Each structure stands twice: as structure tokens, then as C-alpha cells.
Image (cartoon, rainbow, N blue to C red):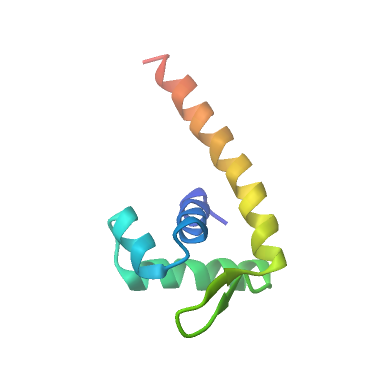
């Protein structure tokens, strides 16, 4: 699991739409879709419920959203702190 996968997942969870997430991240629809699939494969759980115009997080997806938010905040804080040493 990579931090960028978590960033993609969090954007997807926020927008509730792959295309909108892709636009916000300045990447292709397929990049977001592949990132989500890879994350689900790696974790061995479905993170989102997919349907016709319906998008929602599974229970595992909700939990990952909470934990990923924490992880991204920590990584962002570390990066910011390390930049002060330049």
C-alpha cells in the first residue's frame, strides 16, 4: 500500500465519483479505477459499492477512510517538517 493510493482513495471517498476524483487529482479515470482495484486486491476486501450512478463505501471502506486520513495527515506533517531542514 502506497501513500498515493491512499490519497486517491480519500479523494474518491470524498467525491463519490471516479471521474470527479480523477479530475481533482489531474489523472485519468482509469488511473483512479486501477488504483482502487489494486488497493482492494492488496487488502483483500471491497472498499466501495459500485452501481449505476450509486457509489458508497463499504464498512471496510469507511474504516480505511478514517485510518487513511490519519496516515496522510502524519505523512504530510513529516514532509512539512523535513522541508524546514532545507
Q: For the point 60% across and 49% down, which residue is it?
A: 68
Q: Quadrant of residue 53?
A: bottom left
Q: Is residue 20 above or below residue 80?
A: below
Q: Is residue 62 above or below residue 77?
A: below
Q: Position of residue 77 (x, y in %)?
A: 52, 28
Rendered location of residue 79, percent (x, y):
46, 29
Front residue of 49 and 44: 49
Q: Quarter-wise, where is residue 61 in the image?
A: bottom right
Query: Residue 21, position in %: x, y?
Result: 38, 61
Look at 66% across and 69% down and name the residue there: 58
**Residue at x-position 44% and y-position 59%:** 15
Which image quadrant: the N terminus?
A: bottom right
In the drawing, does residue 38 fall left or right of residue 34?
Answer: right
Looking at the image, the residue that sits furthest to the front is 53
Q: Nearer the viewer, residue 78 or 49?
A: 49
| Horizontal relation, residue 5 to residue 46: left or right | left
Image quadrant containing the C terminus: top left
Amino acid at each position: 500500500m502506497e501513500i498515493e493510493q491512499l490519497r486517491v482513495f480519500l479523494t474518491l471517498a470524498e467525491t463519490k465519483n471516479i471521474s470527479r476524483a480523477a479530475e481533482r487529482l489531474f489523472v485519468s479515470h482509469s488511473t483512479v479505477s486501477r488504483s482502487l482495484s489494486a488497493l482492494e486486491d492488496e487488502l483483500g476486501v471491497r472498499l466501495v459499492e459500485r452501481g449505476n450512478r450509486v457509489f458508497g463505501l463499504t464498512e471496510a471502506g469507511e474504516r480505511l477512510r478514517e485510518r487513511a486520513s490519519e496516515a496522510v495527515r502524519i505523512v504530510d506533517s513529516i514532509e512539512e517538517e523535513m522541508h524546514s531542514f532545507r
